[in-house]
Image (tube, helix red, strand yellow):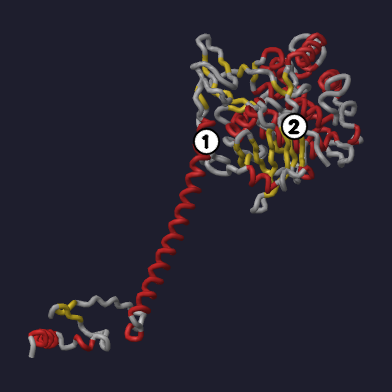
Amino acid sequence: MSSKDSGSSSYNKKSPSANNDKNNNNGPRYLDGHKIPMLHLTLPFINHKSLGDREEAILIGAITGATLILLLVVTCICCCCCCRCCKRKKKYHKIKKVSNQQPGSNDIHLKMPSTTASGSTSFDTGSSGPHWTPLPPPHPGLAMGFTKNIFTYDELATATRGFDRSLLLGIGGFGYVFKGVLPNGKEIAVKSLKAGSGQGEREFQAEVEIISRVHHRHLVSLVGYCMEGEKRMLVYEFVPNRTLEYHLQCKSQPVLDCPTRLKIALGAAKGFAYLHEDCCPRVIHRDVKAANILIDNQYEAKVADFGLAKLCAEDNTHVSTRIMGTFGYVAPEYASTGKLTEKSDVFSFGVVLLELITGRKAVEIDESLIDWAAPTLMQALDGGSFDAMVDPRLEGNYNRDEMHRMVSCAAACLRHAARKRPKMSKIVRVLEGDVLLDDLNKADTKANVTHGSGDGISDYEMHSYNKSNRSSQEFSSGECSISS
């Protein structure tokens, strides 16, 4: 036997199964006489005896791929959640920046008044000197807050069917008001402010800063708002029964009876009393008029439109500001000096009471309602007969005591001297019948509304008042033309 044969025989002895490898794939493997360890992957749910190596590899690859796909899906979901959180956080910081903007910037925001060395106070909007401090953000437990109810433009466009003109509720000086419906079925009123309007920007800022802090059943609630680019929109609760002005002036509407008029007057008075005496800082509405008193289906009044409102700190006697308002409602001292107090709102509310009593507009073509009412109020209070001034559409169907309370309150609110006008809380008690009319008239109500001397509105004072209003006042066109 040759050496070659001997080597081959020796190899075969060390590897007795080498010649059987082709027929025995599951047996041990040898290399140079050494046994090669084998790695077996066992899956509990697979019958490995029935699978070859190729089938087992394919199955393992499929399971691995499915696992990777599942991980990829979970990762994508996590990324989407993070993006949404970042987007909300970005909106929050955007609103917070507007709310807490530092003085001296170009953006407009409300400022708290500061006391000067002379003890006087001032209050205005826009950029200012180092004495001003921005308003703090509202308390998170109040009506809206700054981190929720922030609507996108697309959401409001969907709610109003693309701002369909058939849903137009009114047109004001700074924009349009549309009715809308949220996905949850809640009805809303969307006020879209005109882009690029400085006054519209101030109105938006005032509404967000003020009405989000107040809560009262006789104040319209702010549901939310939208800030996208130059778009500024305010979202209110929808009050279905239009405005007091509409019910008094629209001839096709049923005539409001005397108890309903008193109910509306009382509700509005409660809303203003809350703003003046229960809020801190106090809120001066500055645009009290029939068009800004909304009526619900139960004929409850809700005060609306805080776009011109001002805040006044507790230790300040008045606010000095640019004259704004609606002709026929503005108090004489505010029209002539620009000094705004709660008593300015009281005067305007007196005009609203006159509208409820008489059914006349605040301003007719030839004269104002105050011009017409001054001598009529004197005669009614002196003689105890109100037929000459009561809305003729009532046809004499009114309760004399209720009408007496309304007339007395109107006369007291319209006193020329602001310091002699009653607080709104006292007006509420008189309208409720809890305060004697003699208490309301202690400041000589009749003398203050007659054409005479003293604190009354004399002919000269009335002429000066009207002239001052017409020449110097920047009137907001807040009155809405209601669509049918």
Give the residue at x 86% y 41%: 253
- Between residues 202 and 337, which one lies in front from this camera angle? 202
**Earlier along the polypeptide chain: callout 2 or callout 1?**
1
Identify the image quadrant of residue 320. Answer: top right
Residue 94 tag number: 1
Kind of residue indicated by mark 1: Lys
- Between residues 95 and 17, which one lies in front from this camera angle? 17
Q: To which residue does mark 2 refer?
A: 172
Q: Is residue 405 visible?
A: no
- Between residues 414 and 36, which one lies in front from this camera angle? 36
Identify the image quadrant of residue 50. Answer: bottom left
Q: Nearer the viewer, mark 2 or mark 1?
A: 1
- State the residue lying farthest toward the front: 2
Badge 2 marks a residue whose secondary structure is: strand
Give the residue at x 56% y 13%: 120
Identify the image quadrant of residue 189. Answer: top right
Quadrant holding the C terminus: top right
Estimate the x, y position of residue 439 in percent, counting from the top left: 70, 24
Estimate the x, y position of residue 31 in percent, counting from the top left: 16, 78
Kind of residue indicated by mark 2: Gly
Asked if residue 13 lies left or right of residue 271, the reply is left
